[in-house]
Image (cartoon, rainbow, N blue to C red):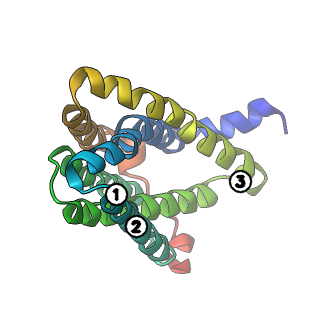
Amino acid sequence: RRSSDLWRAFTEHTWVWLLTVWVALYFTITYAPFFVLGPYIAKHDLGGAGAWGTVVTGEGIGSLVGALAGLRLRPNRPWVVVGAIFALTSVQSVSLAAHVSFVVIALAAVIAGFSFSLGSVIFETGVQHAIEPDKLSRVSAYSWMCAMVFLPLGYALAGPIADVVGMSAYLSFGAVWIVATTLVVYSVPAVRNYRFPAAAIAAS
């Protein structure tokens, strides 16, 4: 197939490209600052490397549980569910911004890891059921490339931006951003009204 046909397969479903752009910005604005600024805050205010290791471990545990849940969960309106659970990732950013106990931040990281992993599995399931098999690999590649392309920029800018506005302010902004944009994404009918086909729900 021509590249233009495969790119059209990526863009013809509004929810595919819109959610991809949304996640790309999430990585840049919310995700990257947490993992860049977190080690510094842990070193100076939370008890050091061990505290941050606990937070990252919590993220990993949550991711594992979220992936296992994603193998079974097939919500009828998947993007409403994905939006809601992605908004929950704001809790870890707010907790880190407030410099609360690393135990609390680790628990918030469990929630964030669960949310991200479950949302990723549900999204990939939706793509597999919506895209024709001969276009699926290219559409998935476009989706992951576009979603991840700005993550290095997010890592690079987190420090300089935090120097200007403050670490807590930048982390809080990332938390507010993901919640606010979730509502914006919900307002798009192609996202809000999309339902998994019956075959996908039965497969769970």
Circle 2: residue type: Thr
Q: CA distance from mark 1 to mark 3?
A: 43 Å
Q: Secondary structure at mark 2?
A: helix
Which quarter of the figure has residue 170?
top left
Let me know if residue 76 appears in the view.
no
Location of mark 1 (residue): 52
Q: Earlier in the sequence, mark 1 or mark 3?
A: 1
The answer to which of 30 and 129 lies nearer the viewer is 30
Which quarter of the figure has residue 124?
bottom right
What residue do we see at 39% from left, 46% from top? Answer: 35
Which quarter of the figure has residue 158?
top left
Location of mark 2 (residue): 57
Q: Position of residue 59 (x, y in %)?
A: 39, 63
User: Is label 1 or label 3 in front?
Assistant: 1
What residue do we see at 24% from left, 45% from top? Answer: 44
Q: Report the label total.
A: 3
Q: Residues within 10 Å of mark 3 (few under 14, many from 20)?
A: few
